[in-house]
Image (cartoon, rainbow, N blue to C red):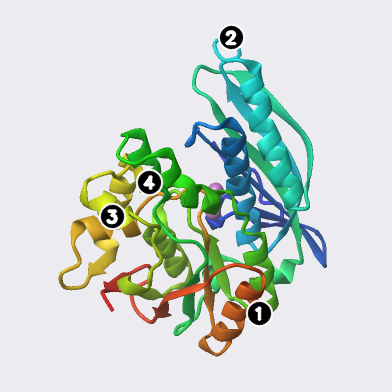
Amino acid sequence: MPLPARDPRVLLGLEARDDAAVYALRKDLALVQTVDFITPIVDDPYTFGAIAAANALSDIYAMGARPVTAMNLAAFPVRSLPLGLLEEILRGAAETVAEAGATLVGGHTIDDPEPKFGLSVAGLVHPDRVLRKSGGRPGDALILTKPLGTGILTTALDRRMIAEEDLREAVGMMRALNRAAAEAMVDTGVRACTDVTGFGLLGHLHELAEASGLSARLCLNQIPVLARVWDLARHDAVPGGSRNNHRFLMEHVAWGDGIKPEEQVVLCDAQTSGGLLMAIPPRRRAQLVRALEERGVSGWEIGSLTRGRPGRITVVRS
Ligand code: CO
Ligand code: CO
């Protein structure tokens, strides 16, 4: 089937593989669009709605944009589960969208035996300030704003290897908007950005590095990881998606001496509503970390972009 002629106002579309699409409205204004939905990862419906909303909003923030409107997408077994649960999911999402300073303007629900929930989000940005994956330069420092391990922890809870309260820190991370992180990066001249979600830290870094035409070098000891995650990985509490990421990334990653498979898989762990991964010139990294901290966000420097085969990642222990 021939593709329709490309609209020149589509600045980033299907072929761009960025976090969201960008459409020029005027010389100084562009529309950013994204959609994301997930299956329940926690039992509490309000919390699930809040996490799904933070997760969907994240792609707007990863582009350096500001969300303005959102629409719910819900699949729910209307005959077998009480509708009050769906109302709680929607309430969690609505409050998170409000916290983002955006407005919920509609949505749609279908009957489905497997619950799913997410949102389509629209944002605005100046076309010259869009943060793409391709903007990285050699020597840029890599900064990550949330610790890893939400996939492993939710899998461990599923298998009853941990208690509900062991998930509290991870839930706090997944509910936290990337809004403040995005504002800090727009203020301090970050050159490239993406958010860490289903492909894990290494999968998303691989995309950013490849798009920038560069390799990357990471330092395992500097990568922030949630409590208990190293131990749970050793005990095999690893979701299938994270294992697939690990397998797929094998050909792109050079592992330093003595880095064990159970450590490798943590860096490939599929995240829900993970942090932003940013590339910034080294002379501005201290300013970025300070701007993040002023907004209550942590920024960990985990490595750098280097010249070399596009998308290649070297992981050393320290
Ligand atoms: Co994304
Ligand atoms: Co996404």
x, y percent for residue 35: 62, 42
Where does label 4 land, which residue? 153
Secondary element at image label 4:
helix
Residue type, mark 4 in image: Leu
Q: Are marks 3 and 1 in contact (CB under 8 Å)?
A: no
Q: Nearer the viewer, residue 52 or 48?
A: 48
Q: Quadrant of ligand 1?
A: bottom right
Residue type, mark 2 in image: Arg
Viewport quadrant of the C terminus: bottom left
In the rendered view, would you say 181 is above or below 7? below
**Marks 3 and 2, how far apart in space?**
39 Å
Query: What residue sits 61% from the left and 46% below the top?
Result: 56
Q: Is residue 50 left or right of residue 224?
A: right
**Marks 2 and 1, how far apart in space?**
51 Å
**Marks 4 and 1, how far apart in space?**
33 Å
Residue type, mark 1 in image: Thr
Quick one: label 4, few (<14), some, or many (20+) residues within 10 Å? many
**Which corner quadrant of the image does residue 305 belong to?**
bottom left
Q: Are marks 4 and 1 in contact (CB under 8 Å)?
A: no
x, y percent for residue 184: 66, 72
Q: Earlier in the sequence, mark 4 or mark 2?
A: 2
**Which corner quadrant of the image does residue 31 belong to?**
bottom right
Q: Which mark is residue 188?
A: 1
Where does label 2 land, which residue? 79
Q: Is residue 98 left or right of residue 268?
A: right
Secondary element at image label 1:
helix
Q: Earlier in the sequence, mark 3 or mark 4?
A: 4
Q: Are marks 3 and 2 in contact (CB under 8 Å)?
A: no
Secondary element at image label 3:
helix
Where does label 3 land, which residue? 265
